[in-house]
Amino acid sequence: MNTTKSDLPGASAQAIQHHYDVGDSFYRLWLDETRTYSCALWESETESLELAQLRKLDYHVTQARAHGAKRVLDVGCGWGALMQRLTREHGVQHVTGLTLSATQKAYIERQGWPGVEVRLESWLDHVHEAPYDAIISIGAFEHFARPDQSDADKVAGYRDFFRHCHGCLKPGGWLSLQTMSYENSSREDFSDFFAKEIFPESDLPRLSEIAQASDRLFEVVTLRNDREHYARTLKAWRQRLTARRAEAVLEVGEAVVARYDQYLQLAMIGFHVGTMGLLRVALRRLPEPRGTSPRASAPPGESSSSGGSRTRG
Amino acid sequence: MSEKQPRTSAEIEKWLCETMGDLLDVSPEEIQITTHFDSYSLDSSSAISITEMLGEYVGKSLEPTLLYDYPTIQSLAKHLTETR
């Protein structure tokens, strides 16, 4: 299986599959009905995980101004919950989802959702047929850098992503981004367990790096750090995994279940104490960006009139 | 897990001193009940292990974040005996 044609700045397809291709049935045991594998957006003490996940999806639709749009890009589409929500509830005509997980792609294609297209490719390899009205990326940015990269290379890779999004978006388009982040910590504070067992080849961004990488391509309009929302989401996942532990062990074995249980607990602590953050960022495409970076190459499919290739001296 | 007989605050404090002593390879007498857990350089994996064992000791399921909300042996034992 060859899923990456370009030299991705972040985690490889194999590294992504290490985490996400454990098995659909395993995740189904402890994720909510929408199979959303990212931080929810909670409002009340008593609401269900599924309701909080749907609120999170709708939040990003609102932030990206995607309601009623013709074309939307979902970078890191997971099992397609957002794509389904966009087309079914928000009147979006066509959604393109990108994933590096073969099992996620196969799952989405089996659903036969109208207006939904899923591609097994990275954002770097994605060539858009027509500009998008909006881009949403939830829980993918965490994989856009590797722990062995220098800070400069890391930001350059992020900037390639923002430049690519800029080139894919219509004038006035919005990007809504959700990602975990380093907060009161650095990459050295995290154990080998995270780096090797959970998210190989992946490194979290800092807020300052996102700001730096998107500078003069997008303007940050809304920013939230909802780290306590992630602690609560992880708690809900762990309660569900614990309740169905015997089934989970039958699906993937004791070692994998123990690895996930440890991950959920460590992450819960990280978000609770603030070593990690959960950023939700709404960015508006700048019409005439003045940002140039010699290290950031023009992405494929970027038209000559797009911001990504326009420079001012 | 069933709570056969409630542990007293003193029992929990003694148990935590012994358990942390074992973990850090020091005598239980060297563990102070009013000293912040951070001072013992406990990492989050160790905090998870202690919380799991503590849950078995007191007979209830405990959240992995508990040691961060009650960051000394004294405050943790007090919380566990007051919330029964």
Image (tube, rainbow, N blue to C red):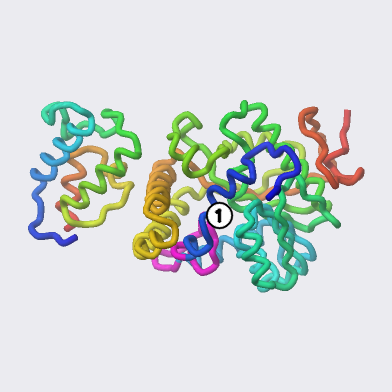
Q: Nearer the viewer, residue B7 or A125?
A: A125
Query: Which residue is more in the foreground, B18 or A89?
Result: B18
Q: Is residue A137 visible?
A: no
The amino acid on which the numbered mark 1 sits, given as a three-letter code, is Asp
Dot 1 falls on which chain? A
Image quadrant assignment for residue A136? bottom right
Quarter of the rendering containing residue A130: bottom right
- Residue A308 placement: quadrant: top right
The stretch of residues the image draws in magenta is A29-48
Can you say whether A151 is above or below B6 in the image?
above
Is A216 rendered above or below residue A251? above
Secondary structure, magenta segment, majority class: loop
- Find the residue positioned furthest to the front: A1
Question: Is A98 contained in the magenta span?
Answer: no
How many numbered discs sit on the rendered protein? Answer: 1
Which residue appears at 64% of the width and 68% of the height?
Answer: A85
Q: Name above or below for residue A153 compared with residue A200.
A: above
A38 falls in the magenta region: yes
Residue at 28% from the left image edge and 43% from the top image edge:
B49
**Residue A107, position in %: x, y?**
62, 65
- Residue beneath the point at 67% across and 34% down: A212
> Image check: A241 left or right of A141?
left
Taking the image as drawn, is residue A171 in sight?
Answer: yes
> What percent of the width, then of the height, locates residue B68?
31, 42
Residue A152, position as x, y percentages in the image? 66, 27
Judging by the rendered image, the residue that carries numbered circle 1 is A21
